[in-house]
Amino acid sequence: MSITPGKWKVTEGAFGGAKFDHQIGICSVDGKLIATASTIHVGAINAEANARAIAEVPAMIEALNDAVRAMTHAVPAGRYATALRLNVKHKIVAILKRIEG
């Protein structure tokens, strides 16, 4: 089993051809509804934060896979190892910024 491929985005209002009150949608870039975050019990601010976090799942998986590869393969010390670690760090920092808003 795997997740819906590609990047995901947060949408509000009408999505997937329907309008849902009190919900924020998480859709694939081609507009297919993947999940919704309800604003009813957690409030709009928390629901939006939840939706941003859910939308980052594909990017998080990619960054985690990069981190595993960087830690698994014997990488000699030097510029390449430093560049590899910095690349993974930058991906993770970017994901956290998008989630935290």
Image (spheres, rainbow, N blue to C red):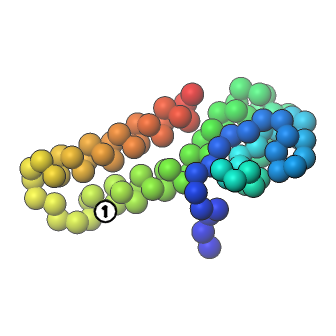
Q: Residue at x 10, y 58 (%)?
A: 76
Looking at the image, the residue that sits furthest to the front is 30
Q: Residue at x 39, y 43 (%)?
A: 91
Single out the residue that lies furthest toward the bottom: 1
Front position in the image: 51 or 17? 17
Q: Nearer the viewer, residue 32 or 69?
A: 32
When the figure is inspected, residue 79 is found, relative to residue 43, above or below; the finding is: below
Q: Amino acid at mark 1?
A: Arg
Q: Position of residue 55 (x, y in %)?
A: 62, 46
Disc 1 marks which residue?
69
How many badges with numbers are in the image? Answer: 1
Q: Find residue 34 and report its image quarter.
A: bottom right
Q: Secondary structure at mark 1?
A: helix
Q: In the drawing, does residue 79 fall left or right of residue 4?
A: left
Neighbour tally class for label 1: few under 14, some 14-19, many 20 plus, Cα within 10 Å: few
State which quarter of the image contains the C terminus. Answer: top right
**Image position of 48 (left or right of 83):** right
Placement of the N terminus among the 4 image quadrants: bottom right
Most foreground residue, 95 or 15: 15
Residue for point 44% across, 37% down: 94
Identified at 56% across, 36% down, the residue is 99
Asked if residue 39 is positioned above or below residue 69 in the image, the reply reads above
Asked whether, in this view, residue 57 is left or right of residue 18, the answer is: left
Locate residue 29, reporting x and y percent.
Answer: 65, 50
